Every structure is written in structure tokens, then in C-alpha cells.
Image (spheres, rainbow, N blue to C red):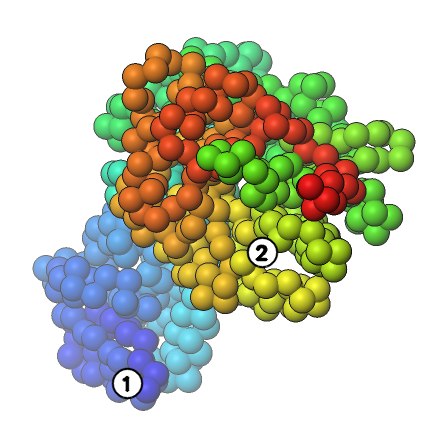
Amino acid sequence: MVLQKKVLVVEDNMLNREILCDILSSTYEVLDAENGQEALEVLEKYGEEISLILLDIVMPVMDGYTFLSRMKENPGYSSIPVIVTTQSDTEADEVAALSHGATDFVSKPYKPQIILHRVASIIHLRETSAMMHRVQYDRLTGIYSKEFFYHSANDILSKNPDQEYDIVCSDIESFKLINDVFGIPSGDMLLRTVANIYKEFVEGRGICGHLNADQFVCLLERPRWDYTEELFVKANERIRSETNMKNVTIKWGIYHVKDRSLLAEQMFDRALMAARSIWGQYGKHLAVFNDEMHNSLVREQMITDVMESALEEEQFTVYLQPQYDIKTNTLSGAEALVRWIHPEWGFQSPGVFVPLFEKNGFITKLDQFVWRRACAILREWDDKGYPQVPISVNVSRADIYNVNLPDILTDIISQYNIPPERLHLELTESAYTENPSQIIENVSRLRELGFLFEMDDFGSGYSSLNMLNNLPIDVMKLDMEFIRNETAKSNTPGILYFVIQMAHSMNLHVIAEGVETQEQLDRLRSIDCDYVQGYYYAKPMPSEEFTAFLAGMDKK
């Protein structure tokens, strides 16, 4: 059942009121009041549920003009359209009604079809306007939405080629943590406070918008003053004061608009890149996009342009790093690491291209290439009768959220006739902390199929013990920095010892990464670590070298 729209008739003459109610009742739910005071009481009750008001001007207790003035003062229903009804049809009366905020003007006696058409038309216009407002404005903050900001900014830039502009953006560090600690309402209040600062900042000189979650942006005409740390320090202090969040940290980035061929979206990315360049730097609030950042973007674009062809041309290759059983000092497995050797650029650091591929989504294709190559290597080993050690492969965040992941992995191991327990799947600790419930569900499905999971880089981020207790994993891999820091201390038991004991109590095996010295190895052996990998034993090597190493073991 479709609910009827509500229309309020305000008329002191009973006969006129009944006529209007009768005309409208076939189409609308009609409310009525005898004067302006009663009408305000009806408004207080129903607010913006009322779609339109038909208002007489000459009434006792409170006349129509007074009612209009009082109504427009209240933002809760000031936008409701009002049609003034009166015996007089002079131009002066019409102007007076419109100047007090009326939307339209009709004279008595009433003509039913005219009344119905006017009411329907004005309600439609209001609803269309409200819909456009919702599209244009972010509901939470009241400033431009992402799409409308970009549309407006591009329009302004194209129409004002001689005016200089800046893109200023901000990013709140650890906003998700703020929501988790203080709650969603406090997080929303923080966002509204930031939006208010932007409104004041751009007043008369530009536009501003609320973009992705905690990100804001504005397009400003080039000011006559410089952007200074002090300006943004004061903005941060005000935000902390008004929200009572003493530790909130906001980083600001600026892009001076030079390249007009860029879209506003790309300009925002540059300003955001500047802001993120100072993440984690105490006392730094502001950064300006510079040549170094530009060169980095150019480099990223060059990599993006060739990544598909690089995969097709087999420029990517799999290296393997041995893992050893610390008690028997024998080979226990290998970790697959992707390497990229470009025909012109040479060796490309994974620290450069892997984060980029994670950002642009290409990492899923690269991961599947590594999985297939790892299974092909395992098949070769089995066919030649070499020791049946497992290979660990990386599973990115993008992979683990793919509902088809179990099918993809089972298809690959079936193609090479490899049992699932021989292909260990690695997820970083930080991936588990982002959306633990969904990660736990997806990992559990894969473990039911026989795959084993390793938590990579444990100790590099933060994990609650409760979360760790709920994770369906088989192996904990300790971050290399964690190892270095702990083994550099005295021989007294440190946190590393207790982490390993805790893992064992949970029936988890422990692998220590980045082992480089005999001292580190001895320390890990003394605190009952299970497996190790690192330069002390061997650097990552081409899979062919590792296979030759296995062949040598098999002959012993």
C-alpha cells in the first residue's frame, strides 16, 4: 500500500476549509488548522512529513504572514512549500506573500483542477529538488558529495583557465581505530567538525567536498597568503578541542594546480599523496606535492602500463627461500617470492611494484601466476622423487575477499595433482586485523578443503589476544624486525619466548624469518622455535637452483 502524501490546509473560514479539504482528499491525506498558531502545532507534530501547505493570509490569533515568518525560522520545516490562498488577487498581495517565503499564490473562489495541478506540480518540484540535494550534498556533513565535487571542480577549472587554484585535502590517521574506540557517533561528530572547518576555509573562494570516509578536499582560488604549518596546527587544535579527542591526528596535503589536463580526481590523488607522505611523522601537519612525488607517480604509471605485458612475456619469476627445522637442521619447506626482471629496467624491487599492484588490483593476477608456478614446481619434485616439502605462497587481501578463491585454488592443485597441504597459504597479520570476522570465515572454508594457513609478519602490527585465539591458522611467522629486536637483548627470557610458548599452547608451529647470524639461531633454538629462514642459511634463489639443491639432498 502506497502512503498518501500529507497536505496541510490553514483556513479560518470553515466553509472554505471544507471545500479545500474535499478537493484534496481524493489524492492526499489532508490535515487542517483554523489559524497560524494551530498550524505551527501541526508542523511540530509532523514536520517534513507534510508535503505542502495551503495558507490563508487573513486569520485571527496568528495571520498568514506571521505564520510564514515563524515557519521559515525553523530549519526542520522551512523548506516545505506554501501556496497562499486569498480573496485578493492584486499584484501587491502576491508580492507580499512571495516576499514572506510563499512558493505560489491562488485566489478564491477555488477552482478544483487548478488547485490539484498546482499542488501536484509544486510537490513534484520539491521532491525533485530534494533528490538532487541528496545527490549533490553529503548527508552527514552537508558539503558536496564526492561525485558532485569532482563534477563542479572540473567545471570550474575549465571555465576559468586564467585563475590559479589549489587542491587542499586532509586525511585522518587511524580513523577506523577512532570509530572502534570512541564509537560511530563520535566519529561522525569528528567528520562534521572537519567539514565545518572546510566550509569556513573556502567561503567565497572555492568549493569543498567529503570524499572517502575520513577524506575531505577543497578547490581554492590561489590565496594571497602562504599555507603554513601554523595554519593547520590551529585547525587541528580546534578539531581536538571541539570533539574532545585529544590524540586525533589529521594530515593535510596541497597540490598547486599546474597541469590543467588532469581531472580533479587526479589532482586530489596528488594532494592525498602529499598528505600521506607525512603519515606517522610527529609535528608534521602539512605537505605540498613536489617533483619527487611527481616522479614517483610517473614511475607508477610506467609500471602500470607494462604490467600486463610483463606477465604475458614471463618477465616475472618465482624465487624460493629455504626453511629449516631448527632442531634437526634439515630442510622443511620453502617460501615462494616473486621477482620481476624487466628487459630494459633490470631487477625491480618487490617493495615498489607489489604495493602498487595491491592498490590497482593487478596483485590477484600475479598471485595466481605464483600459485600455478609453485604447483608446477611441486609436481616436478614429486615426479622426480625429491623430498616432499611444502611451498608457502602469499595470499593478498584482494584474494581472500574473492568468493571464488576456493574454486580457483582447488582447480590449480587439481591441475597439477598436488594435495592441498603441500601449498601453504600466507596472510599478513595486518590483513587479519582489518576485517577479522570475514577473514576467519573465508580462511575456515579453505582449511576445510585441506589448505594450511600461515600468519605472516606477526609482531609487525597489533593483534588482540582474543583475535589470535579465534584465528584458524596453523603456522605463525615471526616478523624479522621482531626477531632482530628481541635477539639483540640480553639472554633473559623476553616477549619472544612467551609468544612462542603461547603459539605452542595453541598447537601452532612457529617460523622465524630474517635469521642472519649464529647468535640469532642459537637464541631461537634455546627458546624452542620450530623453523627458521633467512640469509644465515640461504638467500631467495631461482627455483631451478632450489630444485638442484633438492636433487643433491636426494642423492645423500
Residue 261 % position (x, y): 77, 36
Name the foreground residue: 363 vs 155.
363
Name which quarter of the figure residue 39 lies in.
Answer: bottom left
Q: Disc 1 and disc 2: Cα gap in Å?
A: 74 Å
Name which quarter of the figure residue 322 lies in.
Answer: top right
240 up-or-down from 181: above or below? above
Identified at 56% across, 38% down, the residue is 330
Question: Which residue, as the protein is rendered here, is positioned at the far right?
Answer: 344
For the residues carrying marks 1 and 2, which lies nearer the camera in this image?
2
Identified at 21% across, 56% down, the residue is 67
Q: Amino acid at mark 2?
A: Arg
527 up-or-down from 115: above or below? above
In the displayed structure image, the side of residue 473 where residue 336 appears, left or right: right
Q: For numbered disc 2, what is the local secondary structure?
A: helix
Q: Which mark is residue 302?
A: none
Q: Which mark is residue 422?
A: 2
Residue 77 % position (x, y): 28, 56
Residue 411 % position (x, y): 65, 68
Quadrant occupied by the N terminus? bottom left
Identified at 44% across, 38% down, the residue is 530
Q: Which mark is residue 25?
A: 1
How many numbered circles does the render carry?
2
Q: For numbered disc 1, what is the local secondary structure?
A: helix
Q: Amino acid at mark 1?
A: Ser
Whether label 1 touches label 2, CB < 8 Å: no
Identified at 21% across, 69% down, the residue is 10
Q: Is residue 224 visible?
A: yes
